Image: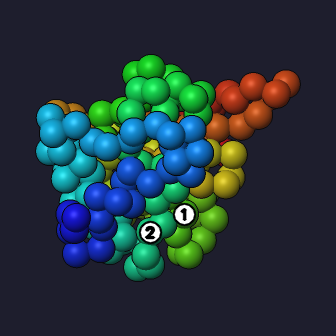
Amino acid sequence: MKLTEHFTLEEFTRSNIASRLRIDNRVPDELMANIQLTANKLELVRKVLGFPIMITSGYRCPLLNARVGGVSTSAHTKGLAVDFHCAYGTPKEICQRLIDTGVQFDKLIQEHNQWVHIGFSLNYNRQIVLTAIKNSGKTVYVNGLV
């Protein structure tokens, strides 16, 4: 199902882990508006970056989210966040570009210098910027881009 010019519902729900564990990761009808909002905002992100975006993790049903170690309040479970890669540059460069160009988001995380997490909100845009790093084997979130 095509959501926008460049994004499909399948991109938001695809998960190797869900397939392997036979987890039904279909988006409930009541969350489709959130998925549509996220897809629309990702179109703006794609335009700013000037390159296609490859979603590596979009919607996660609560069971899948738990299996991948996500927090129970994750925006992924609401259809309001994605993790992605883009040929624009490194995750830090991508984050910096999104900040510099004024893209509106709720939360932007440079994850272990491997991918970008961007979350959106229905009612507000807190513009929280974090960097996820490993410290003694645990993920720690540091304010700003490191």
Tell me what residue is drawn at x 71 percent, y 37 percent: 133
Q: Which of 146 and 83 is in front in this view?
A: 83
How many numbered circles are shown? 2
Tell me what residue is drawn at x 36 percent, y 70 percent: 46
Amino acid tagged 2: Ile
Is residue 128 shown left or right of residue 137? left
Tell me what residue is drawn at x 58 percent, y 33 percent: 68
Is residue 35 shown left or right of residue 71? left
Q: Residue 56 carries which label?
A: none
Q: Distance between the residues labelled 2 and 1?
A: 6 Å
Residue 83 location, x and y as percent? 49, 51
Q: Nearer the viewer, residue 129 or 26?
A: 26
Is there CB contact under 8 Å for labels 2 and 1?
Answer: yes
Amino acid tagged 1: His
The image quadrant of residue 67 is top right
Q: Can you say whether 94 is above or below 74 in the image?
A: below
- Numbered disc 1: secondary structure: strand
Looking at the image, is mark 2 or mark 1 earlier in the sequence?
2
Q: Mark 2 points at which residue?
A: 53
Q: Can you say whether 137 is above or below 35 in the image?
A: above
Q: Nearer the viewer, residue 101 or 10?
A: 10
| Quadrant the N terminus occupies | bottom left
| Quadrant the C terminus occupies | top right
Q: Mark 1 points at which residue?
A: 85
Task: Please identify the residue farthest to the front as the structure is shown.
Answer: 22
How is colour applied across the structure in the image? Answer: rainbow
Q: Which of 22 and 67 is in front in this view?
A: 22
